[in-house]
Image: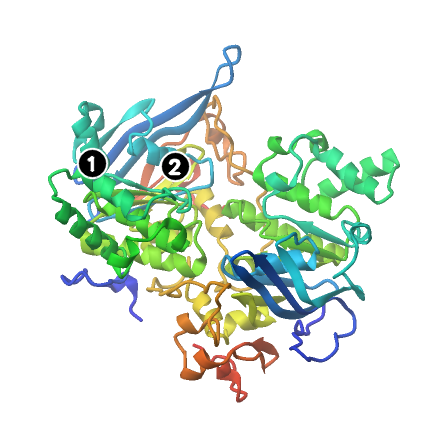
Amino acid sequence: MSSRAVELTSQSGPPARPGAILDVRDLSVEYLLDSGIVAAVDRVSFSLGAGEFVAIVGESGCGKSTLLFAIAQLLSPPAEITGGSVLFQGRNLVGLTDSQLTAIRWKDLSVVMQSAMNALNPVKSIGAQFKDAMRAHGVNSREEIAARSAEVLRMVGIDPLHLHSYPHQLSGGMRQRSMIAMALLFTPKLVIMDEPTSALDVVAQRSLMVQIKELQQQFGFAVIFVTHDMSLVSHFSDHLMVMYAGQVAELGPTQQLFDSPAHPYTAGLMEAFPSIRGPRRPLKGIPGSPPDLARPPHGCRFAPRCPKVMDRCRAEPPGLYNVDGTQVRCVLYEGGAGRGSAS
Amino acid sequence: MTELTASPSPGPDGGPTAPGAPAVPEPGSGSAALLRAEGLTKHFKIGNTLSQRTLHAVDDVDLAVGERQIVALAGESGSGKSTIARLLAQIYRPTSGHIYFEGKPLSSIRSRADRLRYSGLVPMVFQDPFASINPVFRVSHGVQRSLKLHRPDLSKQQRQDEMLRVFDVVGLAPAADVIQRYPHELSGGQRQRVGFAQALATRPKLILADEPVSMLDVSIRIGLLNLMAELRDAAGVSILYITHDLASARYVADRLVIMYAAQIAESGPIEEVLAHPKHPYTQLLLSAVPDPRAPLGVSAETDRGEPPKVIDPTPGCRFRGRCPLAMETCQTVTPVLNPVAAGHEVACHVAQSGAEVEAF
């Protein structure tokens, strides 16, 4: 697996790195509401190599799910991509027609949604839904469909017997597993996951994460994993993108972000988790709440909650700075200061 | 930063105090307990007339909450923790068993006035702050109603003052401004604080908090947990904190009760239980908690089992199907809670036999 950081290219950044299967560049999404324009995703750029696992974390309303939907071209009005590109295997997904996208979906790129109960069709058996997906891609042989369906279910640790089961007959964990099985029908290059474990109990959550990681290592697909709980991905993702108010706050190798968070927001998040081990100590969390994206603060969007705020933070939006192989949107690093200045 | 375990008892100023063990002794076998449940059982009939079956939601649970104490009730979904809260709040009638509040059995409550008094002393705070507040009224509405209902002796001015006081206590400042708002104008964390303000308005002794922070963003959760610790330390309120998050339980709670399949698997002082978990299920739960501070590396053991739905159960340990240590006895004899250390009880044949339990 590549040890290189996911490269975040700023507004006029360097070209995509060779071998990247996904290159998101200056992607912006706006919700065009009667009450005004809400910039939910603001010029986000990153690239993802084959077989890499990137986690996108942030609070509710930070734009992480919107970003993911924009990458998968699943946005519907009033949300609209207003700029940027999504190069997937060298092809820009933005602007493709539905039929062009259909050819890619499931086959090269699949999406696992947050709530499998809502994503699966309640009146069709699991097997019938697998069959639909395979038929849509021209696999019509009954034997082939049956064999592959049983195979993917076994891969996620479910007895193929459950091909005849309906979603309501499965537990929450099994439903999420069958969604993942369905996503793997065609061995895609990229699997996009939107909080697939958030409805599960802690034991089921852990076992699903381990399973996703095992499958990923076995089949070599890349993963974009969206979650609000960064402790969940700490052991699983190669790279971590922390989003705040529609923008990238910090992006870099997961381990590095956990060891020495650079952005005050990332540092604050680290201070928001009580630990199950070690001494009990008081934590502060992050006071305040995220800004209203219809009226974002004039300068840095985190300024109203930031413990390190300076006068200039309120005056001008900070750029993205390179800090020891990570990208940080904070003026603390303008002069090339090292990581850890936030803590 | 101060270590919580060494934190002194809260100052008289009532200011923000670090969460930690209160300077109040653990309740003993029940006489000192504020609220005590004995043999609490709730069964639901399911199926139709031809196939009558019984779902055991809560089976023979003994539980005590002391004064100024936060007790965390933890377990997977479906383990019966919310049913216990509803039994304690008298939303459900127990199938069998007794609940004592301040030493008096709840079953002796007959009059509407007594029922009102109890629900004022033991209010609930719900999981979903988006669904538990009426969206068409200002947030002051719920508090006003509580005050009118539970404290009819207050004058209009006193009600207003009391309302401002509780909003202030839960950290919704400026209170005079916040009470004018509608729920949609508040964030999830603020709404959950309104839920606590509503509970506080009735001058409670014990708040039943059913997953009060699980719907909130991580950066907001700590603020609510700190509020719960403050309510205990400054206002002397006890809290039954229902959660599936052991890390947050450890942060605020004094005692921990682990539920599995409608029964209590293990209970005790929280640091003792987490440091020396005796029940294999507690060990499984602990091993699954994501902890960024733990050494990196995907652990090999994965438990794919799931908690059983307890329908017409047969005797035997309910965890035996998932337990790597299950013995002959576990198949046929239901384990009961027995002490293994001071105040630390476990319902496990292996642990009670004195053997070292290292299941997960």
Q: Is residue B8 left or right of residue A255?
A: left
Q: Is residue A29 left or right of residue A295?
A: right
Task: Using the image, name the chain to which the residue with label 1 belongs.
Answer: B
Q: Is residue B208 left or right of residue A172?
A: left
Residue with the mark numbered 1: B149
Task: Using the image, name the chain to which the residue with label 2 belongs.
Answer: B
Which residue does the image show at 71% across and 44% down from the upper left?
Answer: A181
Using the image, determine if residue B58 lies above or below residue A281. Answer: above
Mark 2 surroundings: few (<14), some (14-19) or many (≥20) residues within 10 A: many
Using the image, determine if residue A12 lies above or below residue A125. Answer: below
Q: Quadrant of the N terminus of chain B?
A: bottom left
Q: Is residue A252 visible?
A: yes
Mark 2–mark 1 distance (CA, rounded to whole Å): 26 Å
Using the image, determine if residue A168 lies above or below residue A16. Answer: above
For the residues bearing labels 2 and 1, Cβ distance under 8 angstroms: no
* x and y, in percent, of residue A252 in the image: 60, 72
Same chain, marks 2 and 1?
yes
* x and y, in percent, of residue A31 in the image: 59, 58
* x and y, in percent, of residue B345 in the image: 33, 41
Q: Amino acid at mark 1?
A: Leu
> Toward which corner of the image does residue B306 lie, by quadrant?
top right
Q: Amino acid at mark 2?
A: Ser
Q: Nearer the viewer, residue A82 or A112?
A: A82
Q: Nearer the viewer, residue B23 or A95?
A: A95
Q: Is residue B83 left or right of residue B102?
A: right
Residue with the mark numbered 2: B82
Which residue does the image show at 78% across and 70% down from the upper left?
Answer: A19
At numbered mark 1, what does the secondary structure look like: helix, strand or loop? helix
Q: Nearer the viewer, mark 2 or mark 1?
A: 1
* x and y, in percent, of residue B55 in the image: 46, 24
At numbered mark 2, what does the secondary structure look like: helix, strand or loop? helix
Mark 1 surroundings: few (<14), some (14-19) or many (≥20) residues within 10 A: some
